[in-house]
Image: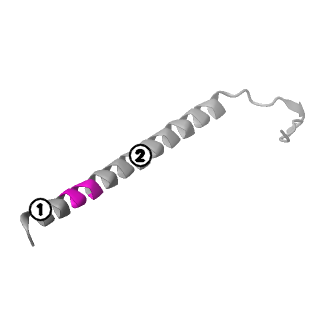
Amino acid sequence: MDTSSIAGSALFMKLGQTQQALSTRMIKQSAEQQNKMANLLAQNARQAPQPAAGNGSSFNFSTYA
């Protein structure tokens, strides 16, 4: 193997590692965004007004949206 072949192989491997690092970072960023969204939805659910009781212990509200 000559020097240029070795250098080309090394460059190719380096490119593969860079692409893998970028892909990993994108997946991590996506997971962080999903986590933020889940936290916001949980916070919103906690802050949402609770339905008032109609008569006795039965609730008169629809979950159909």
Colouring of the image:
one colour
Q: Residue 54 appears at what percent x and percent y?
A: 90, 32
Name the side, left or right, on which 15 lies relative to 43. Answer: left
The span shown in magenta is: 11-16
Name the side, left or right, on which 2 lies relative to 28. Answer: left
Q: Main secondary structure of the magenta part?
A: helix
CA neighbours of label 2 inside 10 A, class few (<14), some (14 to 19), many (20+): few
- Element at label 2: helix
- In the rendered image, which residue does mark 2 sit on? 26
Which amino acid type is shown beneath numbered disc 2?
Answer: Met
Above/below status of 25 relative to 54: below
Residue placed at 82% from the left, 29% from the top? 52
- Element at label 1: helix
Is residue 32 within the magenta segment? Answer: no
Which amino acid type is shown beneath numbered disc 1?
Answer: Ser
Q: Nearer the viewer, residue 1 or 37?
A: 1
Above/below status of 25 relative to 52: below
Q: Residue 58 appears at what percent x and percent y?
A: 88, 40
Between the C-alphas of marks 2 and 1, the distance is: 33 Å
- In the rendered image, which residue does mark 1 sit on? 4
What residue occupies the far right of the structure in this picture?
55
Quadrant (top left, top right, bottom left, bottom right) of the C terminus: top right
Residue placed at 42% from the left, 42% from the top? 29
